[in-house]
Image: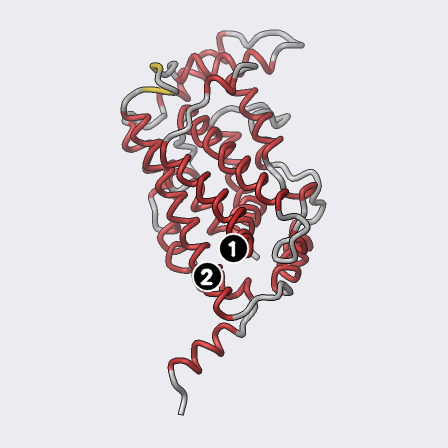
Amino acid sequence: METPQTHSSESMSKDLSELLKEATKEVHEQAENTPFMKNFQKGQVSLHEFKLVTASLYFIYSALEEEIERNKNNPVYAPVYFPAELHRKAALEEDLEYFYGSNWREEIPCPEATKKYVERLHYVGKNHPELLVAHAYTRYLGDLSGGQVLKKIAQKALQLPSTGEGLAFFTFDGVSNATKFKQLYRSRMNALEMDHATKKRVLEEAKKAFLLNIQVFEALQELVSKGQENGHPMQPTGELRTRNINRSYEHGPAPGKESERTQRKHTDMMPSTPLVRWILALGFLATTVAVGLFAM
């Protein structure tokens, strides 16, 4: 007769990648059913929110990659150490300089929820490095897969240059074939030596990563609702977009009246309230992760 313990043991005998997919199924379904999934595809996203998301991602990836470097020779992480292919900190620095200018480090905000996420990553890396793979797999594979869809949509919706400025985060120059790379990553991850108890802890950590992401976006929503960015009133969307478009014309003629009309028309299409816009943006990180996990 099969007992609950027997069933649990058989379940834990599956590959870690499959267990992660099953464990995050509920949050994936939630992401699929958010208004964000439908509205983002219509291009209904504001540059303000996109910039703030990028800033928080910078702090998150800086912490994650600091702990990855700390544990790159540790057997519990070394097999999935792919800095040239996956690491995002440098790409995010490039994007932030594009959006905020050369003084971006003094401009970007770091809400308490983002700090909490960062603290968790440092705690895991220093005290429980065997759980670091949950954060790395959830983030990197999600960005590599689902992020490519969001890249094209964001580029069109925000009128970003076709040359890719502002979207370096989504560009993985070190990965020539995403499908083959994901297969390699999964096989390396599945080969990690891990007992059943550790697997359970990794699955719980992956769920916690999703929760931390959601809390980050709730904090950013509050920041936007107060009309502030790093403690200062935020610039109008049109002004920011004009600044970035002008930057793309540094070596050529500035856009004319027709372009200005296009900018105004695009701005008018933006959702009119912070709440509506953040309903769209709230699913950004979770959607990227969820799409990535289920696209493998």
Q: Which residue is mark 1?
A: 131
Q: Residue at x 39, y 14 (%)?
A: 235
Picture coordinates of residue 278, whole percent (x, y): 33, 34
Residue 140, compared with residue 131, is above or below; it is above
Taking 270 as reference, is 119 above or below it? below
What type is the residue that disc 2 sits on? Arg
Q: Quadrant location of the N terminus?
A: bottom left
- Classify mark 2: helix, strand or loop: helix
213 vs 200: above or below: above
In front here: 36 or 214? 214
Q: In the rendered picture of this protein, how many numbered marks are placed on residues?
A: 2
Residues at marks 1 and 2 touching, judged by CB atoms closer than 8 Å: yes
Q: According to the image, label 2 marks what residue?
A: 201
Instruction: Specify whether 89 is left or right of 82.
Output: left
Write the residue at 48% across / 68% down.
Answer: 197
Tell me the tag on residue 223. Answer: none
Mark 1 neighbour class, 10 Å CA radius: few under 14, some 14 to 19, many 20 or more: many
Q: CA distance from mark 1 to mark 2?
A: 7 Å
